[in-house]
Amino acid sequence: MNKMKKITSMPLFLPIFCMLLVMAANIVYDISCGNFALNFFSISVRNGVLYGRLIDILNRGSEIAILAIGMTLVVSASAGTDISVGSVMALSASMCCMILAGYGNASVNELANPLLLGVLGGILIGCVCGAFNGFLVAYLSVQPMVATLILFSAARAIGLLLCNNLIVYVRVDSFKMFGGYLGFLPTPIVIAAVCIVIAMIVLKKTALGLYVQSVGINKKASRIAGLNSARFIFLCYVVCGLCAGIAGIVGASRISSADSNNIGLNYELDAILSVALGGNSLGGGKFRLAGSIIGAYTIQAITTTLYALGVSSDVAPVYKAIIVIIIVTVQAPPFKAYLARRSAKKALAKGGAAA
């Protein structure tokens, strides 16, 4: 009993447990279909590239994993969520493709401007959007959801204006590489891995992670202790915008175009769910980036599993909503207090029986 309690109290128990449940569901599904039981874990090389369900999950979940980095910091520092990241992805993709294709062009086979300029332009506009959100939250004390609702509504429209109300196609191999393959490995996996490693190194090797958590736990106390709370909150939103910009470039590269209406659609919900599924409190404070990353890929695994089970993309959000309800309930203080009372009663009952 004590061992089980220690296991369940581990910081990463919830995300790992959810991931194991998804894996178990896939194993049961494969057995019921007469396939090899461990078909979910099989990885092969086809046409010179890695192929398999796990590779597909890591590949398709890359954008959500990148977004989860910034969302984790935003939630921790401001006790709020950035609901504009999906729209900022679309805006960054539009800016990138517009620069690469040249203003007014709907489709190009040759770059009008250097690739680096387009990529940096897309990432920069993401940082600008993050700075806008951060300024409203940190310095004007606007509620995070209200502040980010502005770009949630406007960013896609701005992207359409940048592209002259067109879907701009950039059919150039060098641009397709960001959403394609780097050797035998999908490039989005490499990009996500680099972003995750950099974020973890910065948060572990510097005091930034500690400062962000301190601000999230008690903003006033942090300010009294000498920390500029507003500056750290602002920085977290800028990082979130940076992550959205990178994810937008990857998303545009996958389809070789800037489809402002569909790139990053509903991704903000998956990013928020990743943070919650990772065992992080949506009320701010302490965070576990590793949990958010596991949560991001778990969500993609859930989505892939639902599609494999024949669930349509229109119905899939219902199952995600059920997962959110369960997670929020488990994390709610009254529910935790209820479990603590039950555990104390059982301990007393055992003590009385032993006496």
Image (spheres, rainbow, N blue to C red):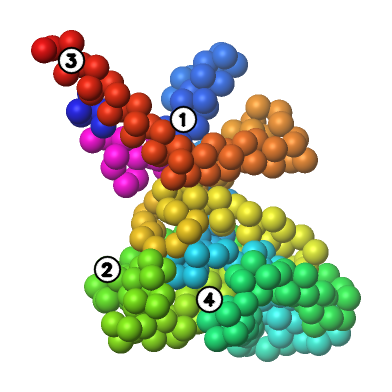
Span colored in magenta: 6-17
**Residue sitting at x 24%, y 17%:** 349
Could you say where residue 69 lies in the image, as x and y percent from the top left?
A: 46, 64
Residue 19 visible in the snapshot: no
What is the C-alpha distance between the residues marked 3 and 2?
Answer: 47 Å
Could you say where residue 308 lies in the image, as x and y percent from the top left?
A: 64, 31
Q: Name the residue under label 3.
A: 352
Q: Mark 4 points at which residue?
A: 237
At label 4, counting other C-alpha atoms closer than 10 Å, the crowd grade (few under 14, some 14-19, many 20 or more) is many
What is the C-alpha distance between the residues marked 4 and 2?
Answer: 19 Å
What is the C-alpha distance between the residues marked 1 and 2?
Answer: 30 Å
Three-letter residue code for mark 1 = Leu
Q: Main secondary structure of the magenta part?
A: helix
Nearest to viewer (mark 3 / mark 1): 3
Image quadrant for the C terminus?
top left
Three-letter residue code for mark 2 = Lys
Q: Name the residue under label 2.
A: 204
Q: What element carries label 2?
A: helix
Three-letter residue code for mark 4 = Tyr
Which tag, 3 or 4, sits closer to the chain's start? 4
**Residue sitting at x 35%, y 26%:** 342
Nearest to viewer (mark 3 / mark 4): 3
**Residue sitting at x 76%, y 60%:** 262
Q: Is mark 3 on a helix, strand or loop?
A: helix
The reply to whether dot 3 and dot 2 touch (C-beta < 8 Å) is no
Q: Is mark 4 on a helix, strand or loop?
A: helix
Which tag, 4 or 1, sits closer to the chain's start? 1
At label 2, counting other C-alpha atoms closer than 10 Å, the crowd grade (few under 14, some 14-19, many 20 or more) is few
